[in-house]
Amino acid sequence: MRNIFSHLPAVCTLGVLAVILCGCASSPPSKFYQLSTMSGPDSETHSPDQDAMVVVIGPLRIPDYLDRPQIVTRSGRNELRLSEFDRWAGSLDSDIIRVLVENVSAQLPRDRFFVIRWTPLLQTQLSANYRIELLVERFEGTSDGVVLLRAQWGIFSPEKGLLLKKESQISEEVRGKGSDAIVDAMSRAIGRLSKEITDGIASKAAI
């Protein structure tokens, strides 16, 4: 009898360990997502003219609730849902900037415009002809099967300051189920925002 009770702590420890290991084994693997550009990956390299106008995109700010690795969806008016196993491959704000830069660059004449992302160091070392600042207020899938994007943005120049300010409200249908379909709709929403920004730059540059 004494031998049975003397081994009881070890047996309990092994039992707890087995439960933990089984739980870990049954957890689904995480999936990682990126936003996509309007035209997909572009392998070509382009060299703008020396006199090409410089367009800097950024800084960009997103709400705190989106500034996390999990993909966020809105399941009700006041409820948000975090997909623990569906995550962004990097930071969402950085990914939005990457796609905006690629989309806008693809839509403007590449011999006349050089589009790059904003950094604090760049601001002190490179004079930009146009700078695009953005504030994203909403950007998530909803229970209605759409992605909503609401953003305020402005175009600035060093000489004249604010040239254009606008609020974009974009809705894109989610075509399918799951996070892959949501991210696809988010990419299309960023594509439409890119077009609005491109049109704004074109109107100010008179092209």
Image (cartoon, rainbow, N blue to C red):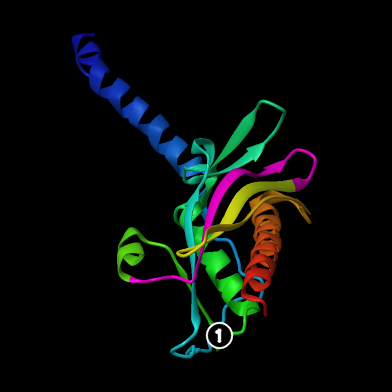
Q: Is residue 62 above or below residue 101?
A: above
User: Which residue is at a point 49% across and 37% down the rendered structure image?
Assistant: 64
User: Which residue is at a point 68% across and 70% down the rendered structure image?
Assistant: 203
Q: Amino acid at mark 1?
A: Arg
Magenta span covers which residues?
A: 126-146
Q: Position of residue 204 (x, y in %)?
A: 63, 69
Q: Position of residue 134 (x, y in %)?
A: 55, 52
Q: Is residue 84 magenta?
A: no
User: Which residue is at a point 56% across and 82% down the rendered structure image?
Assistant: 42
- Of the 4 image quadrants, the one containing the N terminus is top left
Residue toward you, 111 or 36 = 111
Q: Is residue 7 above or below residue 23?
A: above
The single residue placed furthest to the top in the displayed view is 1
Residue 176, by quadrant, is bottom right
Q: Is residue 160 above or below residue 88?
A: below
Q: Is residue 142 magenta?
A: yes
Look at mark 1 in the image and give the residue it sits on: 112
- Of the 4 image quadrants, the one containing the C terminus is bottom right
User: Which residue is at a point 65% across and 44% down the rendered structure image?
Assistant: 140
Q: Position of residue 185 (x, y in %)?
A: 71, 56
- Neighbor class of circle 1 (other Cα within 10 Å; few <14, some 14-19, many 20+) is some
Residue toward you, 85 or 90 = 90
| Magenta span dominant secondary structure | strand
Q: Position of residue 137 (x, y in %)?
A: 60, 41
| Side of 201 where 2 appears, left or right | left
